[in-house]
Image (tube, coloured by chain):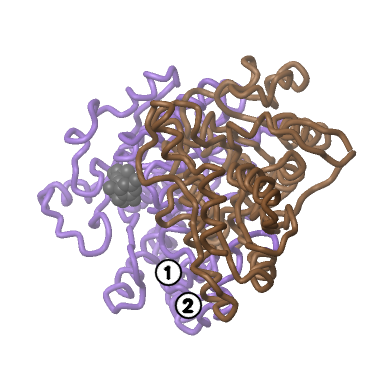
Chain colours: A purple, B brown
């Protein structure tokens, strides 16, 4: 990997972090409505996955989707505008935090019903298999999602049809306030993939380089026509499940402990220790991101509300 | 014009569309090797092969979910639910995913898919396997819901559904498969969202669709012998719902009966009646009547089951009451 590539991973993670920190403030000010699920702490996962993909590989994830949105190249302006419900958001202000997508960037959404996008991901992969393309669908979901039926139907179908899907469970240890052991019959979630005969692996998710490496290997395996692969990626969310989570289900020491492994800090140290860049260069990236996010907030705040006609637009593709 | 059954009409439409467009494929339980539980896809597996006629696990969410994903990539899946009663196991994907994706992402996605599902009572299958829950699905904007009652409409509407860029639920009725009727030669489509006068008359407007249409046509024959000529309007599509022919007819007759096989409460009849009150109040000369299923889970016993289902005699009685 070239120096610029490390710095780009770093920039993306800092951009996700800063965008979300600002979003949290805007939420407190009442400028963002609905649910807001922050990805803070988990940035290495989506950043590593997107860095590992080829342009023909589709991304699809759950409602904790700001990370993927930024990784695939949606701008901070588009993300911020969608959060504020503005016409300039990628979903025209009609999707909100949980529903970001971009066909152009091969990002098939943020999906808010837990687990429901897994069968849809199987269908996206079927689309590629049917046409003989070599794209892989990378489908991300939480640990909690592995307890709903859709997960099991989706995994089973993917193996029966040998679909090109990379299943990625982001095990952040909790589904809302329920710890994995309290909701899942097996706490090592990769064992569920074992049950469907899908090759699988559990990896650490706080080091973006490790995530990228594991994803590259998995994608190559799938691209050779071997069918699906399953990655369980161990990670942790530093913030509450969504805004206003009283966090009664965990001790602050546990959070502190994980924060020592902050994925941005991990990469920062790695870059400096391996002399890929200087502290100064990294500081400059942070400063640039800071400015980019401020501009995005300003842009979003000054953007127009969706026009009233938008209420009835895009219900159907055809005239009715 | 050839005379064929509804089953044949559906089968022909599917086959012709698959021959016309490589992107059309079928998935569902027993659609392939078995030939379709209701024999609609008999011979398809041999003709088109396993890539385009895909047997699935018994996993309704996976069937509809995979169809949605494939449709988003530009394919045109026709997902068959063995019966509409199993749609509830895929409810999220049918009402909460397929109809929402385009709108929610600001028009970025198209979901050109068809869900074929057969429903209906009258075959002593008991309460879980005999339902006509059409109105439930028609409730959701973003989904198109069609339910043809004749071979001509079955063929033309299925073709329209497959060519539509939106998700369409195509509801069949198990006791209509053998119903025969004339079908135009060659390729044709029946537009989605257009009601049709199936039989002209002047006495009472009787609005129906699917199985209710068959019953209504039989009632019309009986009533004609007594000199009462009802006008039969077939909705064909439940969403979008085309009220124009209904209102036009109602302005002439000033009386309406609505016939559906589903339960009366919150049903298609309730919707049509409300629209008539809202949009044609000045033309009402008699209370609008509904003929529908009794409010019970459908029993197995043949006599009880028939007591619960709407009958030709109920339609005749309702027509006479509003005259
Ligand atoms: C079918 C369904 N049930 C419940 C919810 C409410 N809900 C939203 S997120 C969530 C927890 C999911 O946990 P997990 O899959 O681990 O993802 P994480 O939030 O940790 O990223 C729940 C219960 C939902 N959105 N969908
Ligand atoms: Mg979780």
A273 lies left or right of A310: left
Picture residue at 55% right of the left edge, 58% below the top:
B320
Q: Few, some or many C-alpha atoms within 10 Å of disc 2 (few <14, some 14-19, many ≥20)?
A: many
Q: Which residue is mark 1?
A: A83
Nearest to the observer: residue B43 or residue B316? B316
Residue farthest toward the front in the current orientation of the protein: B226
**Looking at the image, residue A259 lies above or below residue B118:** below
Disc 2: which chain?
A: A
Q: Few, some or many C-alpha atoms within 10 Å of disc 1 (few <14, some 14-19, many ≥20)?
A: many
Q: Which residue is mark 2?
A: A300
Picture residue at 58% right of the left edge, 46% below the top:
B212
Picture residue at 45% right of the left edge, 81% below the top:
A301
Q: Are dots 2 and 1 in contact, CB under 8 Å? A: yes
Nearest to the observer: residue B272 or residue B317? B317
| One can see residue B308 in this view | yes
Q: Quadrant of the C terminus of chain B?
A: bottom right
């Amino acid at each position: 990997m070239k120096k610029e590539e490390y710095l780009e991973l770093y920039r993306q993670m800092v951009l996700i972090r800063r965008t979300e920190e600002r979003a949290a403030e805007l939420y407190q000010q009442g400028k963002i409505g609905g649910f807001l699920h922050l990805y803070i702490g988990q940035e290495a996962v989506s950043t590593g996955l997107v860095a590992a993909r080829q342009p023909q590989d589709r991304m699809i994830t759950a409602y904790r989707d700001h990370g993927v949105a930024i990784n695939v190249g949606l701008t901070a302006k588009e993300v911020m505008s969608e959060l504020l419900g503005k016409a300039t958001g990628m979903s025209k202000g009609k999707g909100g935090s949980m529903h970001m997508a971009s066909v152009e960037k091969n990002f098939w959404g943020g999906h808010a019903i837990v687990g429901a996008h897994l069968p849809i991901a199987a269908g996206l992969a079927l689309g590629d298999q049917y046409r003989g393309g070599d794209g892989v669908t990378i489908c991300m979901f939480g640990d909690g999602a592995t307890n709903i039926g859709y997960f099991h139907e989706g995994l089973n179908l993917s193996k029966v049809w040998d679909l090109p899907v990379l299943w990625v469970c982001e095990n952040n240890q909790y589904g809302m306030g329920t710890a994995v052991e309290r909701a899942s019959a097996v706490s090592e979630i990769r064992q569920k993939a074992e049950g469907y005969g899908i090759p699988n692996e559990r990896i650490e998710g706080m080091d973006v380089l490790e995530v990228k490496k594991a994803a590259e290997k998995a994608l190559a395996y799938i691209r050779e026509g071997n069918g699906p692969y399953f990655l369980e990626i161990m990670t942790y969310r530093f913030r509450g499940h969504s805004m206003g989570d009283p966090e009664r289900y965990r001790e602050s020491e546990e959070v502190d402990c994980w924060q020592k492994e902050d994925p941005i800090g991990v990469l920062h140290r790695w870059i400096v220790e391996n002399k890929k860049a200087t502290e100064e260069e990294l500081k400059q990236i942070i400063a640039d991101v800071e400015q980019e996010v401020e501009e995005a907030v300003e842009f979003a705040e000054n953007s127009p509300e969706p026009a009233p006609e938008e209420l009835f637009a895009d219900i159907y593709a055809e005239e009715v | 014009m050839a005379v064929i059954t509804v089953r044949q009409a559906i089968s022909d439409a599917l086959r012709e569309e698959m021959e016309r467009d490589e992107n059309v494929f079928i998935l569902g339980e027993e659609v392939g090797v078995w030939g379709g539980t209701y024999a609609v896809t008999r011979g398809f597996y041999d003709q088109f092969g396993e890539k385009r006629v895909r047997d699935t696990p018994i996993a309704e969410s996976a069937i509809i979910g995979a169809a949605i994903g494939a449709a988003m990539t530009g394919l045109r899946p026709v997902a068959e639910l063995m019966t509409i009663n199993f749609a509830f196991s895929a409810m999220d994907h049918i009402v909460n995913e397929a109809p929402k994706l385009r709108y929610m992402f600001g028009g970025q996605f198209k979901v050109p898919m068809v869900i074929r599902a057969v429903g209906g009572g009258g075959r002593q299958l008991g309460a879980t396997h005999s339902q006509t829950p059409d109105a439930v699905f028609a409730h959701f904007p973003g989904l198109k819901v069609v339910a043809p009652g004749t071979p001509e409409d079955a063929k033309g509407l299925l073709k329209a559904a497959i060519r539509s860029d939106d998700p369409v639920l195509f509801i069949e009725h198990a006791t209509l498969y053998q119903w025969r009727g004339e079908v135009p030669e060659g390729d044709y489509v029946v537009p989605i969202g257009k009601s049709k006068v199936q039989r002209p008359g002047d006495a009472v407007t009787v609005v129906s669709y699917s199985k209710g249409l068959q019953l209504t046509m039989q009632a019309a024959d009986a009533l004609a012998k007594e000199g009462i000529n009802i006008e039969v309007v077939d909705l064909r599509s439940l969403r979008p719902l085309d009220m124009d022919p209904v209102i036009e007819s109602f302005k002439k007759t000033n009386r309406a009966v609505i016939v559906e096989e589903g339960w009366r409460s919150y049903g298609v009849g309730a919707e049509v009646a409300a629209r008539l009150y809202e949009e044609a109040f000045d033309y009402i000369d008699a209370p609008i009547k509904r003929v529908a299923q009794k409010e019970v889970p459908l029993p197995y016993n043949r006599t009880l089951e028939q007591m619960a289902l709407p009958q030709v005699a109920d339609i005749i009685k309702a027509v006479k009451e509003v005259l």
